[in-house]
Image (cartoon, rainbow, N blue to C red):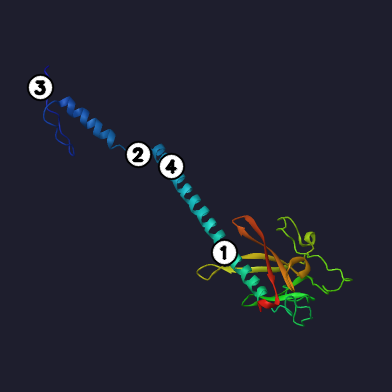
């Protein structure tokens, strides 16, 4: 039978009329359309969800890492600002009577707010609510003009102590300032940093260093904070000279 002699198909309700021309071609087109519009299988849904979850997890991981990096940078900047504020106060201390203070201050207490501390120390303000007395290793030049007096060598370290070193390893007095709360940009409390400060004040004889009546101040500071689940510790050293002419 010739292709043109196929009987006309019977149309059911909802069927589209056949295309004009070859009837088998119409059947093949309908079969193709049915395959294109068939329902999505469970396996295909699971594969799609797996791909989507992988992309979302990668995005969330990147976001968390970016947040941790930003928060660590903010904490380091805040800690550095706090420490240099303390250093500036020490630089402005009265040369003769306060760098360091060798007289007993009845108000001098340790950072715990209870234990009394003895001189020599330097009084500094940590924040609006906290004042501490930093105990100092003080090596004065007692009589640099006397041939019978031995002038002690400076005690401050010439390099930054190792991160594992403790105060006793370098002959320092440990001033643990305690947990200091830092705030975010919005003013809400972020987290605390732990701060330790070691201070040396060394008198330098002019006969050896070509200066007259000078004090060398060495400050080693160590602070730590939580970065996620990791505790990060930073240690550094600052050194500066003071003379009575700086007043």
Q: Which residue is mark 1?
A: 77
Name the mark nearer the viewer: 4 or 2: 4
Point out which mark residue 4 bears: 3
Name the mark nearer the viewer: 1 or 4: 1
Within 10 Å of the Cα at label 3, are there few (<14), some (14-19), or many (20+) other Cα atoms? few
Q: Is residue 186 visible?
A: yes
Q: Earlier in the sequence, mark 2 or mark 1?
A: 2
* Relative vertical location of residue 58 with respect to residue 223 in this rendering, above or below: above
Q: Which residue is mark 4?
A: 51
Q: Which residue is mark 2?
A: 40
Give the x, y percent position of residue 92.
65, 76
| SS for callout 2 | loop
Q: Earlier in the sequence, mark 3 or mark 2?
A: 3
Q: Earlier in the sequence, mark 1 or mark 4?
A: 4
Name the mark nearer the viewer: 3 or 1: 1
Q: Earlier in the sequence, mark 4 or mark 2?
A: 2
Say which quadrant the C terminus sits in. Answer: bottom right
Tell me whether the residue at label 1 lies in contact with that at label 4, contact meaning CB atoms closer than 8 angstroms: no
User: Residue at the location (13% across, 32% down)?
Assistant: 19
Give the x, y percent position of residue 111.
72, 73
Give the x, y percent position of residue 235.
67, 59
Say which quadrant the N terminus sits in. Answer: top left
Give the x, y percent position of residue 8.
12, 27
How far apart are labels 3 and 4 at the CA level?
Answer: 50 Å
Q: Residue 217's image quarter? A: bottom right
């Amino acid at each position: 039978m010739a292709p043109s002699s196929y009987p006309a198909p019977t149309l059911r309700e909802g069927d589209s009329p056949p295309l004009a021309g070859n009837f088998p071609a119409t059947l093949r087109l309908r079969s193709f359309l049915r395959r294109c519009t068939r329902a999505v299988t469970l396996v295909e849904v699971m594969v799609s969800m797996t791909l989507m979850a992988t992309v979302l997890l990668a995005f969330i991981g990147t976001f968390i890492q970016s947040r941790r990096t930003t928060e660590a940078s903010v904490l380091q900047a805040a800690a550095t600002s706090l420490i240099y504020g303390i250093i500036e106060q020490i630089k402005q201390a009265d040369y003769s009577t306060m760098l360091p203070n060798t007289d007993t201050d009845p108000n001098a207490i340790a950072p715990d707010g209870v234990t009394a501390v003895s001189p020599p120390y330097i009084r500094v303000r940590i924040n609006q609510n906290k004042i501490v007395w930093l105990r100092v290793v003080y090596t004065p030049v007692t009589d640099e003009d006397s041939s019978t007096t031995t002038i002690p060598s400076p005690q401050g370290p010439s390099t930054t102590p190792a991160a594992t070193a403790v105060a006793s390893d370098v002959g320092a007095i440990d001033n643990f300032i305690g947990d200091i709360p830092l705030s975010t940009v919005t003013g809400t409390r972020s987290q605390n940093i732990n701060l330790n400060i070691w201070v040396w004040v060394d008198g330098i004889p002019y006969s050896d260093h070509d200066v007259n009546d000078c004090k060398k101040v060495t400050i080693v500071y160590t602070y730590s904070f939580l970065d996620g689940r990791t505790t990060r510790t930073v240690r550094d050293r600052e050194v500066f000279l003071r003379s009575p002419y700086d007043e």
